[in-house]
C-alpha cells in the first residue's frame, strides 16, 4: 500500500516542495527512510512510532519505506515527523487520501502526539501558495508567521489526532488570519531610543547623515564615550521597514529559528553585535548545509563591530563581497547558496 503526503523544506531562504512517499510491504517489521535524510530526519522514525501508538492508532507491523522526494537534496530538521505519520496512517487507510494533494503538512511530533514548532515556516508558506496548494497544516506556534502570506489557508494543529480528524472531514479548523497593519503598529517598538542620548551633538549629526544616506561609519573614541550606546540606537532613526523588506528579513530569521513565539513579522530594523572572536563562517555564514551568518541576519539593519582592531584579519577580509554586492555567496561541495546582505556597517575602536 502506498500513500503520498505533500510537505516542504527550506533551501537557503526559499523553500521547495517535498513529496513524502510511504510504502507498506510484506516482510519483517522495519522502518527505512531514504532521500538523503540528515540526523534529525533519521531519528524521526522513533518519534513517529511512539506518537502513532500514544494517540491510539495501530502502528503497522510491516516493512515501511519512506522516501523524501526529490531524493538528491539533503533534508534536515524535524518538520517531516507529521507528514511521515500521516503517510503511514494513510497507507493503512486510517486517513482518507482525498485532501492530501491539496495541503502541505509539516511539524515535529513529541512522543505523546503533540505537534511542536519548526523552523523556516514563512518560506514554506510562500512555496505552498506559489505551487497552488489550498492550505498548510502546521504547528499552532508557527501559524501567525505563515498567515502573513495571503492567498492560502493556514490551519494550526495541536496534535496528530486533530490533523487526522481534519483530513477525514470529522473536524473543522478555522484558518488563522493576520492584520498586517496591526502587526506593523505593534511591532514598531524599539527597546531604546535615539532621544535618550544627551550631548555628543557632532556624533549624533554624523549618524543622522549616515542614516539618511545609508553610509557606513567608524567611531573612534576613548572607552566610555558612548560609541556602543549610539550604535545601538542607530536603527531607531532609520526609515520604517516596508512589507517587502520585512518579509525578506523575516525569511532569514525564520530559517535560523529566531522568530519570537507567536510573532508574525520582524518589523524593526535588525541590530547585530557579534563578538570579536567570531569566525569567518559565523560572520558571513557557512556549515555543511550553508546557513546565514551575521551579515545576513543584519540584512536591512545595522551590523555593529565593536573593538574593530580585535577582529581577525581573515574575518574582516571576507566582508568585501557583502559590502560591495549586498549579498553573500557560500559555496560548498554539495551546494552553493546566496543570501542577501544589505546592511549598514558601524564599527567602533579606541584611539
Image (cartoon, helix red, strand yellow):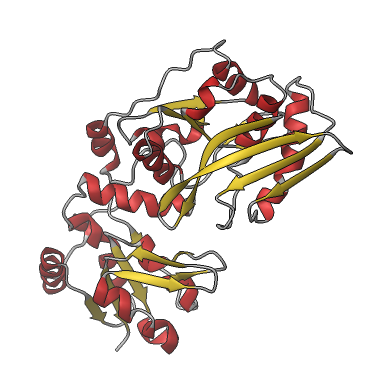
Residue closest to the eye, 284 or 62: 62
Would residue 224 appear left or right of 244 to someone viewing this image?
Answer: right
Depth check, front residue: 173 or 129: 129
Report the residue at 23% width, 44% height from top. Answer: 243
Give x and y (percent) for residue 142.
47, 36
Residue 191 in view:
no
Q: Does residue 287 appear left or right of residue 102 in this picture?
A: right
Quadrant for the C terminus, please: bottom left
Task: Name the spot of residue 332 as percent of width and height, x first.
Answer: 51, 73
**Residue 216 drawn at (x, y percent):** 21, 74
Q: Please give left or right for residue 227 compared with residue 162 in the image.
A: left
Q: Quadrant of the N terminus?
A: top right
Left/right of residue 4 with respect to residue 327 in the rendered view:
right
Q: How many marks?
A: 0
> Residue at the location (57% across, 68% down)?
288
In the image, residue 61 sits, relative to residue 347, either above or below, namely above
- Residue 195 sits above or below residue 336 on the image: above
Instruction: Give the residue furthest to the top.
Output: 170
Quadrant of residue 299 within the rendered picture:
bottom left
Tell me where residue 296 sits by quadrant. bottom left
Q: Residue 151 is drawn in which quadrant? A: top left
- Give the residue displayed 36% in from the left and 49% down from the top: 250
Camera-nearest residue between 236 and 224: 236
Above or below for 141 versus 348: above
Q: Can see residue 186? A: yes
Coordinates of residue 227 in the picture (x, y in percent): 28, 73
Amino acid at each position: 500500500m502506498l500513500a503520498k503526503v505533500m510537505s516542504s523544506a527550506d533551501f537557503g531562504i526559499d523553500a521547495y516542495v517535498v513529496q513524502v512517499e510511504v510504502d507498506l510491504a510484506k516482510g519483517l517489521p522495519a522502518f527505512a527512510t531514504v532521500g538523503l535524510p540528515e540526523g534529525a530526519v533519521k531519528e524521526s522514525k522513533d518519534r513517529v512510532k511512539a506518537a502513532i501508538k500514544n494517540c491510539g492508532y495501530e502502528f503497522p507491523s510491516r516493512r515501511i519505506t519512506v522516501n523524501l522526494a526529490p531524493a538528491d537534496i539533503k533534508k534536515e530538521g524535524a518538520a517531516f515527523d507529521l507528514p511521515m505519520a500521516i503517510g503511514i496512517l494513510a497507507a493503512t487507510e486510517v486517513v482518507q487520501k482525498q485532501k492530501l494533494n491539496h495541503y502541505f503538512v509539516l511539524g515535529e511530533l513529541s512522543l505523546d502526539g503533540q505537534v511542536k514548532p519548526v523552523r523556516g515556516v514563512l518560506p514554506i508558506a510562500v512555496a505552498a501558495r506559489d505551487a497552488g496548494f489550498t492550505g498548510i497544516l502546521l504547528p499552532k506556534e508557527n501559524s501567525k508567521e505563515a498567515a502573513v502570506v495571503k492567498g492560502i489557508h493556514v490551519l494550526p494543529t495541536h496534535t496528530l489526532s486533530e490533523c487526522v480528524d481534519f483530513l477525514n472531514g470529522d473536524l473543522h479548523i478555522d484558518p488563522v488570519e493576520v492584520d498586517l497593519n496591526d502587526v506593523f503598529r505593534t511591532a514598531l517598538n524599539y527597546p531604546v531610543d535615539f532621544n535618550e542620548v544627551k550631548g555628543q551633538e557632532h556624533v549624533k549629526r554624523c549618524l543622522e547623515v549616515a542614516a539618511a544616506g545609508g553610509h557606513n561609519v567608524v567611531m573612534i573614541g576613548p572607552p566610555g564615550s558612548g560609541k556602543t550606546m549610539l550604535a545601538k540606537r542607530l536603527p531607531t532613526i532609520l526609515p520604517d521597514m516596508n512589507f517587502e523588506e520585512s518579509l525578506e528579513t523575516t525569511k532569514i530569521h525564520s530559517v535560523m529559528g529566531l522568530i519570537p513565539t507567536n510573532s508574525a513579522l520582524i518589523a524593526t530594523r535588525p541590530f547585530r553585535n557579534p563578538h570579536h572572536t567570531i569566525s569567518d563562517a559565523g560572520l558571513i555564514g557557512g556549515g555543511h548545509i550553508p546557513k546565514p551568518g551575521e551579515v545576513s541576519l543584519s540584512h536591512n539593519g545595522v551590523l555593529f563591530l565593536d573593538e574593530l582592531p580585535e577582529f581577525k584579519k581573515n574575518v574582516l577580509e571576507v566582508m568585501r563581497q557583502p559590502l560591495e554586492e549586498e549579498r553573500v555567496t557560500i559555496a560548498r561541495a554539495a551546494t552553493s547558496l546566496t543570501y542577501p546582505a544589505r546592511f549598514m556597517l558601524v564599527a567602533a575602536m579606541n584611539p
